[in-house]
Amino acid sequence: MKILTANRLTDGEAVWLARDGIWAEGIEDAETAGDKDGEARLEAIGKAASEANQVVDVNLIDVELLDGGIVPLRLRERIRAAGPTNRADLGKQARPGTGPAA
């Protein structure tokens, strides 16, 4: 299973293509693709968004669904989804309603 990730051009924020076609700041909103046709569709949307200067560094990444949540397989993508590993008070994990206590 794959999802589409990028960095928003205006502020560098890690974002994921959401089910409603917008770039969401939370990985939990990402649209998943389970086959080659779905992956191709996501890639086409990402390419168009990149060409429109909305996002940069567009990539399909491997994920799995665990307990109803989307979990990236690679450590790099898990860090991008949460925030820096040395400061839990920064990044996405520091936002209200997220992180280990949520």
Image (tube, rainbow, N blue to C red):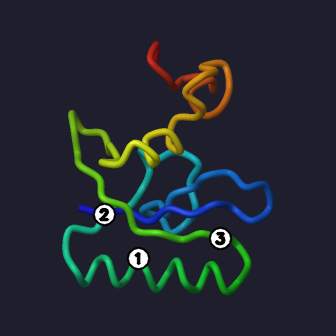
**In percent of the image, x 25 and y 84: which residue is there?**
37
Q: Position of residue 57 (x, y in %)?
A: 59, 69
Instruction: Decide if residue 34 is on the left or right side of residue 41.
Output: left
Per the image, the residue denoted by label 3 is 56
Q: Secondary structure at mark 3?
A: strand
Residue type beneath disc 3:
Val
- Seen in the picture, residue 43 relative to 22 is either above or below; the reply is below
- Residue in front for this viewpoint, 76 or 25: 76
Q: Are marks 2 and 1 in contact (CB under 8 Å)?
A: yes
Label 3: few (<14), some (14–19) or many (≥20) C-alpha neighbours in 10 Å: many
Per the image, the residue denoted by label 2 is 2
Q: Secondary structure at mark 1?
A: helix
- Residue in front for this viewpoint, 87 or 47: 87
Of circles 2 and 1, which is in front? 2
Per the image, the residue denoted by label 1 is 42
Residue type beneath disc 2:
Lys
Q: CA distance from mark 2 to mark 3?
A: 18 Å
Q: Earlier in the sequence, mark 3 or mark 1?
A: 1
Q: Are marks 3 and 1 in contact (CB under 8 Å)?
A: no
Label 2: few (<14), some (14–19) or many (≥20) C-alpha neighbours in 10 Å: many
